[in-house]
Amino acid sequence: MNVKALILGLLLAVPALPVLAQGFADMGRAVEGFALPRPGPFTFPADHGAHPGFRIEWWYLTASLTGPDGTPYGAQWTLFRTALAPGEGEGWSSPQLWMGHAAVTTPDRHLYAERLARGGIGQAGVTADPFSAWIDDWQMTGRAAPGADALSALDLTAKGDAFSYALSLDATGPLVAQGDGGYSVKSAAGQASRYYSQPFYGVTGEVTIDESAIPVTGQAWLDREWSSQPLAPDQTGWDWFSLMFDDGSRLMGFRLRDAGEGFTSATWIAADGTPTPMPPGALRVTPLREADVAERSVPVEWRVELPAKAVDVTVRAVNPSAWMGTLVPYWEGPIRIEGSHSGRGYLEMTGY
């Protein structure tokens, strides 16, 4: 048995493994004993670190990049934490489980890798100040100047079988609280998470594909989110958009799908970083075209409307086949934006 198979066996041998084994829909299951998110201010730098009293958490970065010849690229780096029970523990007694995803997307290729780890043994984790997040040799490392926010400057590395990247990220704007001051409601029934973003990174670095190094520049977006039941029991997945407009403004929006019209939420972010949370239903997202991906039909072109800010755009996948065939599969890839606003961003779709 190879090392990855051994780790997977150890992870899945644990009874009632919540998110990793059962998929995103399991996020709608209530589990007693875990903390629930509450409205209130964030505490930095502490909130950049882990929250082991909550069941689900992630550090999620996506980058829209361009090579010297104008070719668009996408890069993803995500560290997920999920817990069997609240709290920490030493060694193999730790109830914390970790999963890492990394990917590089081109117009005709989507390369991805996955790492799995148990908490308590040093294989994966996060420290808040100085900031560092890691799983095996994948690293998201802070290099913030004294007195600056710990996430204001990051170095990012990851690699898979046919790709790797080394990127430097520098924030040109502030952290942004999503929802009501960082309290992000996910359903009419009131399920919620704590959620903030850093949507203003400039990026330089290098992407390597099949041992060919490509210098890249671009923009990146980091999401931080934690909860214990972020979905309602009848919600089966989401369509999440991070839109970086050429005029410097930003839009975060998502639709959580159920048997009806679903639940939408959005935050308009001005170029100076000022957020305006939108009421449920203010965002409209309409699939325009689907593609056959991994033996399922997935929307890869959308109309996104936010009338309150005169947004009416079409977003198209750079690569419609950007499927993450990981333990919990989903679609994740860079997008191009045209219409009332132009720009680029990322789209994540789960539950298809």
Image (cartoon, rainbow, N blue to C red):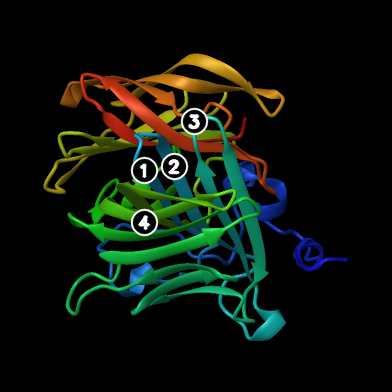
Q: What residue is pinned by disc 3?
A: 107
- Would residue 309 be found to the left or right of residue 237 on screen? left
Nearer to us: label 3 or label 2: 3
Foreground pick, 163 / 342: 163
At horizontal 36% and vertical 36% (from top left) the residue drawn is 69
Q: Position of residue 265 (x, y in %)?
A: 35, 35
Asked if the residues shown at circle 1 and circle 3 are in contact, with their CB atoms under 8 angstroms apart, the answer is no
Q: Position of residue 272 (x, y in %)?
A: 11, 47
Of the residues under marks 1 and 3, which one precedes in the sequence? 1
Q: What residue is pinned by disc 2?
A: 74
Asked if the residues shown at circle 3 and circle 2 are in contact, with their CB atoms under 8 angstroms apart, the answer is no
Of the residues under marks 4 and 1, which one precedes in the sequence? 1
Q: What residue is pinned by disc 1?
A: 65
Rendered position, 321 above or below 132: above
Alpha carbon separation for disc pair 2 and 1: 6 Å
Q: Which amino acid does label 1 sit on?
A: Leu
Of the residues under marks 3 and 4, which one precedes in the sequence? 3
Alpha carbon separation for disc pair 1 and 3: 12 Å
Q: Position of residue 101 (x, y in %)?
A: 57, 54
Tag 1: Cα neighbours inside 10 Å, few (<14), some, or many (≥20)?
A: many
Of the residues under marks 3 and 2, which one precedes in the sequence? 2
